[in-house]
Image (cartoon, rainbow, N blue to C red):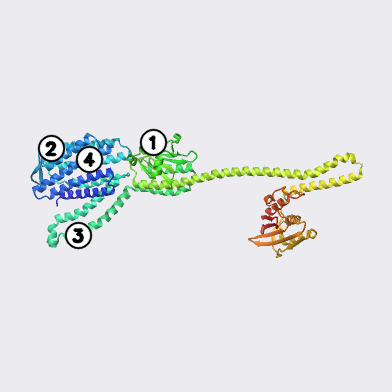
Amino acid sequence: MNPLALSGLLISLTSFSLATVIWFRAPRSRRNALMVCFNVCCGVWGLGTLLVALSQTPRETLWSWRLIHVGGISLGMGLYYQSLALLEVLKGIAIVSVYLFAGVFVLACVAGVSLLGIQGTVGGLHDARVNFLFGVFLLIWIGIVIAGHRRLFVVYRTAQGERRRRLRFIFYAMAAGFLIGTLVLLLPLCGVHLHPYGNFFIPLYLLVVTYVIVRHRPVDLRIVVTRAGLLLGTYLIVLGVPFVIGWWGRTWLEARAGRDWWLVPLGLCTALATAGPFAYAFLRRQAEARLLKEQRHYQRTLQLAARGMTMVRSIAKLAKLITRLVSRTVRVTHASLLLWDRSHERYVLRASHGPKRLSLASRYTLGTADPFIQWLKTHRRVITTEDAAHLPEPFVSQALEQLGAALVVPGMIEEHLVGLLALGPKVSGAVFSSDDLNAFATLANEAAMAVENAMSYEELLKVNEQLKAASERLLLQERLAAAGQFAAGMAHEIKNPLSAIKTFTQYLPEKYADPAFRKKFFRIVQSEIDRINTIVKELSDFAKPAPLQLQPVQVTGLVDETLSLLSNQCLEQRVDVHNTSKKNGLVIQADPQQLKQVLLNLFLNSLEAMPDGGRLEVTTELANRYLTLRISDTGCGIAPEDLRHVWDPFFTTKERGMGLGLAIVKGVVERHGGSISLCSDPRQGTTVSLALPLTP
């Protein structure tokens, strides 16, 4: 097998394989269908090249040359059609004329009108014999190829961003490929017969161009060329090394292996084919690690930064952090963040960073009804300018253009679009790869969670401030109400004795000579003054309690002493006293005088509730470092609507009394570090529980 045959074999295998893969991947895609046709045409041309190199008779060679020209003519038409498809102009006289010319050219070659036959053998290969008509057809074909390249160049010049870079590569790759193909046709006509070693680059060209055109997402062309080159290099080694050994080493192998010499290149081919995929994968990883070193570095930086964003609680700081991090790490012209504003129900520009940052003063916003926002909510994916150019919705491209963005990354939490990150092109002019888009998608999801947490935190702070302000207002109202209640109670208590004194002082001038009146006057005035003094003393005790004089106190002993003071009153009211408190010598730190006053007030309240007799029970319990003292009676109890007011100052249901007793009792117990509670049932009586700590 000579080099021409080997190159034809590689071209045909590569072309037909690519056409098959593309067709089964997306048969309904117009872009893919065009590339399938293009690869089939190239495969026909490669197959004809292989057959020309292997043909043994003039007739076989003639049909092989015809196959070459059919494939080559179709390739020119395919290029022209591709350029029109990129311009989105697939109708008109031009396309009809090109199809008509292709049909005439193919018929002329197959019918022998332009391709007459075989004229001889040069360099071991049969040359085709053509006439002037073939030259005319060939010139027209070259004109169509040039026109196709011109149209492709026009598309490239008017394109923007990633689309421009991709078309530039396609244009130069197409030009190089067709130049090689044209030389294959023209050089033999000019008497130049060279082995077509340049054909070995055509499979590489097909792999790269097909990948760039068919792939919908942006791609780094360095990676494409590297992968295709490594694949083709592996391919050449797997097939080429056994071929070289079999071609040039056949004599040496036959001398040593005899008739089975072919097993050596076959076994070598099998071994290389087995090791080839592993070698290709290893070399590809090493090459991509070098080419994408910087890119993968900032992708790792973005991933690490995304995890730390959840620690930021301020929306303003978080927005600045995200945009500054992306613009500096990825080195884009600008990174701008639009977030959902609940108060205005719009997506508002919150931060922008980079050389071409958006102005926050512009107040760029997007409403929830905006079609671009609805599109992002529906599709939930990264959108680039390249993808937007192929969408039927023109507003997507318009929105990206207004933002000056090469891509937009939505941040979603379930069905809620938290915000969108708009990124301008890279400063270096490099493209955003698929790995970049995946990294941005991950960043957007993490950022959405961080923004949602920060929004919730700020809402919580706002609600907390509102609750705090409301609590302060409520506390002030309670203080004013307590002050008013305090003043009303004090005025009521002092008014009664003052009224009695005023009444007697009015009659004093008239009845001063009456000894009985004077005696009664002095007795009543003295009593009322003592009453006012008692009121003032209770108010003083309530408003400014005496400091605690802590000392070891045996509570059960205080209970016995206080009950002894009330023993006569208990006998007169026929009240049975059951003191079951344990006299275990337990001692607590307390003020004995104030604690005794507490017990006396509680016992007197119980006796006043049982004027016709009853049962008074005292128990103690020790639990959790607290001594609990319970005082229960079987009196009239307290009405349910009055229970919540029993601790309020000046609240009383008695005919006489200020209503400060229980308020003072509660204050003394709480100053000891304890607590007091009360439960009552008008049918069963009242129980008061005091919990006092064993240590102060």
Q: Secondary structure at mark 4?
A: helix
Q: Amino acid at mark 4?
A: Leu
Horizontal side, residue 672 vs residue 202: left or right: right
Question: Which residue is rendered at x = 16% and y = 56% of the image?
Answer: 245
Q: Which mark is residue 79?
A: 4
User: Which secondary structure lies at badge 1?
Assistant: helix
Q: Give the label on residue 402, or none.
A: 1
Residue 615 in sight in this render = yes
Q: Amino acid at mark 2?
A: Gly
Dot 3: within a 10 Å radius of its alpha carbon, few (fewer than 14), some, or many (20 or more) residues? few
Badge 2 marks a residue whose secondary structure is: helix
Looking at the picture, how far across and down is residue 426, in whole percent?
Answer: 36, 41
Query: What's the residue type where badge 3 is placed?
Result: Gly
Q: CA distance from mark 3 to mark 2?
A: 47 Å
| Relative side of 271 to 359, left or right | left
Q: Compared with residue 581, is residue 661 higher up or lower down, i.e. above or below?
A: above
The reply to whether the C-beta atoms of the residues labelled 4 and 2 are less than 8 Å apart is no
Residue 141 visible (yes or no): no
In front here: 258 or 150? 150
On the rendered structure, is 357 left or right of 8?
Answer: right
